[in-house]
Image: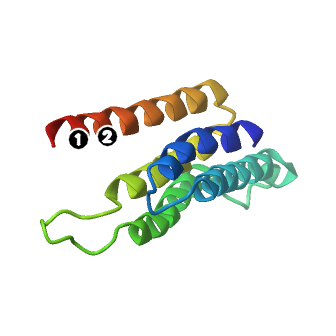
Amino acid sequence: MLLAGLCGLIVGIDSEIKGRPLGTGAYILVAIGSTAVMANTRNFALGSMANDLSIRIDPTRLIQGVLSGIGFLRAGAIMSPQRDGRLRGVGSGAAIWAVGSIGVACGLGYLKEAAFTAALIFVVLNVFDWLELRTK
């Protein structure tokens, strides 16, 4: 969970510096929350109830639920259209959804993949902002 929070912080710092709709805390909380849900589900699936053949456990369904749930937060980050026809907050919405996948990876124990994903998201956000500034 600490790594998930750190990954959320890395992505959230970019958002905070640029004054985006979602602050650092939102990114950290989404990463930690999705990690906790996945870790608890994994522990439940591997626990004593997993041996009960009358109970069917499919932890992969939770991944779909977590990422769908974060979609509501993502939608809230997207504001009404501007006069130039562009939407505000789409980048923040996409980033918060991607941070949820970091939490899922951490919750499943894929820590290297989560760290790489956080670094890649940070790079993508900054490269596209740099390109946008260059074209203005």
Horizontally, residue 101 falls left or right of residue 49, namely left
- Percent x, y of residue 10: 58, 38
Residue 129 tag number: 2
Dividing the picture into quadrants, the one containing residue 127 is: top left
Residue assigned mark 1: 132
* Mark 1 and mark 2: Cα distance apart in space: 5 Å
Dividing the picture into quadrants, the one containing residue 112 is: top right
Q: Quadrant of the C terminus?
A: top left
Horizontally, residue 39 falls left or right of residue 77, namely right
The answer, for residue 94, to whether it is visible in the render is yes
Seen as rendered, the residue at the extreme right is 48
Depth check, front residue: 35 or 83: 83
Horizontally, residue 24 falls left or right of residue 72, namely right
Q: Amino acid at mark 1?
A: Glu
Q: Is disc 1 in contact with disc 2, using a CB cutoff of under 8 Å?
A: yes
- Percent x, y of residue 51: 81, 49
Which residue is at 43% across, 63% downward?
74
The answer, for residue 107, to whether it is visible in the render is no
